[in-house]
Image (cartoon, grey):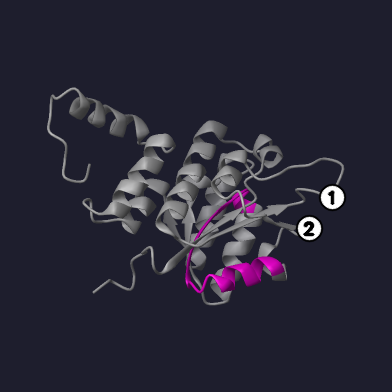
Amino acid sequence: MTDPTELTIENSALVLIDHQPWLTFTLETDSTHLVNNVTAAARAAKAVGVPTVLTTVAARGSLLADPIFKEIQDIFPDVTPIDRTTTAAWSDPNFRDAVLATGRKKLVMAGLSTEVCLAQAVLAALKDGFEVYILTDCSAGLTKDAHEDAKTRMIQAGAKPLNVAALLCEWTPEINSPERNLVTEALLQHGGTSLAVQYVMAQVSAGIVSAPDAA
């Protein structure tokens, strides 16, 4: 029986908030690392069928356009992110309805910036009775202090911190499962563990070691 405290493919939804180029320019983060991490999460969610909600803030309708990261849009080409004019995403009925439509009570949330749009959405979701996990390495703040302060505030309110590698392993704990193979493919293409996985697979290809059953 599945532990009700665990995140599974069947009980969770992924919510990505405002992963946009212009917003990223203003944040204190390694943008390549950030894009790789959030793309790995999005690709894995799509591969294993975890419902995913995409939203942006002021992406269109103003002087400048600031769409969602191309890497995310390419994974969900038929999905138009829910664009808002408020930093308080939960107050936007279209966004809230999209989250409710997933039918999931465990939300894995990441966003830009950590201390503004992500924190506001997380705190509101917690207040409405959702269990929230924050993807800390798929989020960033205006400063490192702002990012850390926001994490502390959300954790004190009941959110649980998580990184993308831990999430994908919790979604697919069985290393021999087809789902784990799909997740590994996402990490090979994006994600911080890709070099380690590539190294192992190179040894297999060279005949130095035998392939694990999961391969």
Q: Secondary structure beneath disc 1?
A: loop
> What range is drawn magenta here?
94-115
User: Which of the two labelled residues, at mark 2 and mark 1, occupies the earlier sequence position?
Assistant: 1
Write the residue at 20% across / 26% down.
203
Residue type, label 1: Gly
x and y percentages locating residue 118 in the rendered image: 60, 56
Mark 2 lies on residue: 85
Q: Specify the quadrant that holds the N terminus.
A: bottom left
Q: Secondary structure beneath disc 2?
A: loop
In terms of depth relative to the viewer, which is nearer, 126 or 204? 204
Write the residue at 67% across / 54% down.
80
- Residue 61 numbered tag: 1
Is there a contact, CB below 8 Å, between mark 2 and mark 1?
yes
Q: Is residue 82 left or right of residue 38?
A: right
- Whether residue 30 appears in this view of the structure is no
Q: Specify the quadrant that holds the C terminus.
A: top left
